[in-house]
């Protein structure tokens, strides 16, 4: 190796050493900068939930309580408990299915065949003397040849009607009580507040969805629903109902509307079914139910008082007849027309009421239609009571004292 070769070799070694030095400096500098970047971004990453910044002395607490905002937190088992859960547990085993069985005769069969023609729900409210008693809707049992009750266990037992009333849409059934374990507690519907929780329990669409639970709120404490019982175009009755947005569907009828304490505050009866309408369900207030059920248990029917008139809503009379025939003052726009001759020995006849009189008030209650008249006679009066009737005859307001009786058929 020559002189110049030795020099060249030394220079190359110097160059390699210089290059390695520069690489070391660059690496150290990059590491320092990277560390600073990480330190500066730690708060941002922590707030975003990607890492947990552990403060001294909090390691154990953090290990057992992962941040709920961290999408990668380890799932844990929790114990579920709430007022709704407890309320349902308290009453659910007192909710039953009610099966309406009718008869159908086919041309190729000599004898009629029993067929199921409807299903609904019911609430066990009493157990005594080896029997259990269930309240349900009248329309659930209407036209039944036989009735069965499906218990919470799924077992079916035969049932008989103790009492029923179509106007109030209530019925009481009796079954063998040996297999009944739970009885529902009735609450007080007069204390309800708009906005408080409401839980509906029943069998929507039949026993396939038995004891379904839905929840909502009390939407209104007082609603009045006109009912045309005989489908003649004139309302025969007004149901006082609680409005709720808890889901109620066919099959829920007769089931329980429950408060957060697990007490029954209403008997589910109907819903508004129209295109674009949701969350309009209704239940009979339990305070009204108690009064009616007591009478159905005792007598099998309601002790209606009898006035003795055939009512016609003034609203269904042509307007020109208001002046021509009835001779009503301009300020009378609602009432009930006595549309037929009044029996001489009926309560109304003995009090002097006649055909074409227009009744506008019973005692101190304004009466606008036949449904209100029937309801007042049923719910506010009993046979033997005296009632003041305010009416118009030939444009003059009059009053009469009427002593009510029981209907003739009773």
Image (spheres, rainbow, N blue to C red):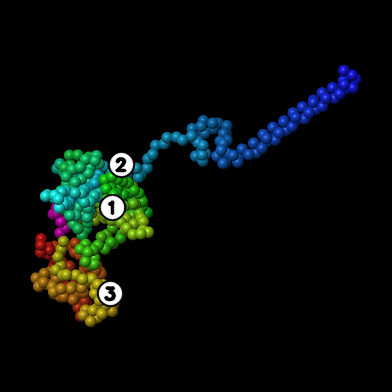
Name the quadrant containing residue 91. top left
Residue at 79% over, 26% down: 16
| Residue range of the region highlighted in magenta in the rendering | 296-303
Give the residue number, with chain letter if any, for mark 1: 250
Which image quadrant: the N terminus? Answer: top right
Up-down relation of residue 132 to residue 245 (above or below): above
Q: Earlier in the sequence, mark 3 or mark 1?
A: 1
| Label at residue 76 | none
Q: Residue furthest right?
A: 3
Label 3: how many Cα within 10 Å (few below 14, some 14–19, many 20+): few
Give the residue number, with chain letter if any, for mark 2: 89
- Relative to 323, 13 lies left or right: right
* Residue 300 is inside the magenta segment: yes
Q: Which is nearer the eye, 96 or 188?
A: 96
CA gap between label 3 and label 2 equals 51 Å
Q: Residue 384, can we see it?
A: no
Q: Residue furthest bottom?
A: 324
Residue at 85% over, 25% down: 11
CA gap between label 2 and label 1 equals 23 Å
Residue at 89% over, 19% down: 2
Q: Give the number of the mark in front: 2 or 1.
A: 1
Give the residue number, with chain letter if any, for mark 3: 333
């Amino acid at each position: 190796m020559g002189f110049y070769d030795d020099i060249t070799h030394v220079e190359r070694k110097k160059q390699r050493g210089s290059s390695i030095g520069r690489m070391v400096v660059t690496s150290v500098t990059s590491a320092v900068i990277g560390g600073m970047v990480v330190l500066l971004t730690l708060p941002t990453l922590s707030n975003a939930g990607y890492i947990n910044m552990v403060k001294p002395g909090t390691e154990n607490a953090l290990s057992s309580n992962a941040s709920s905002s961290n999408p990668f937190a380890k799932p844990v088992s929790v114990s579920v408990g709430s007022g709704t859960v407890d309320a349902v547990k308290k009453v659910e085993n007192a909710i039953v299915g009610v099966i309406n069985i009718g008869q159908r005769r086919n041309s190729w069969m000599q004898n009629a065949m029993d067929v199921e023609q409807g299903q609904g729900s019911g609430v066990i409210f009493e157990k005594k003397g080896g029997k259990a008693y269930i309240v349900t809707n009248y329309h659930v049992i209407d036209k039944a040849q036989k009735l069965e009750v499906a218990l919470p266990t799924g077992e079916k037992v035969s049932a008989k009607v103790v009492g029923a009333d179509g106007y109030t849409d209530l019925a009481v059934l009796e079954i063998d009580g040996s297999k009944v374990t739970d009885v529902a507690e009735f609450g007080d519907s007069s204390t309800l507040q708009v906005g408080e929780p409401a839980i509906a329990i029943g069998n929507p669409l039949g026993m396939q969805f038995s004891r379904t639970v839905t929840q909502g709120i009390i939407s209104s404490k007082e609603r009045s629903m006109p009912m045309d019982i005989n489908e003649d175009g004139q309302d025969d009755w007004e149901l006082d109902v609680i409005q709720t947005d808890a889901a109620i569907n066919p099959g829920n009828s007769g089931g329980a509307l429950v408060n957060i304490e697990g007490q029954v505050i209403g008997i589910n009866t109907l819903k508004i079914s129209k295109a674009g309408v949701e969350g309009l369900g209704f239940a009979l207030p339990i305070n009204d139910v108690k009064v009616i059920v007591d009478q159905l248990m005792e007598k099998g029917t309601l002790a209606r008082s009898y006035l003795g008139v055939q009512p016609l809503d003034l609203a269904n009379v042509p307007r020109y007849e208001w002046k021509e025939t009835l001779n009503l003052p301009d300020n009378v726009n609602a009432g009930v027309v006595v549309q037929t001759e009044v029996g001489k020995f009926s309560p109304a006849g003995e009090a002097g009421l006649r055909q074409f009189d227009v009744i506008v008030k019973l005692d101190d209650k304004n009466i606008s239609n036949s449904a209100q008249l029937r309801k007042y006679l049923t719910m506010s009066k009993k046979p033997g009571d005296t009632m003041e009737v305010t009416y118009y005859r030939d444009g003059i307001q009059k009053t009469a004292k009427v002593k009510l009786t029981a209907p003739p058929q009773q």
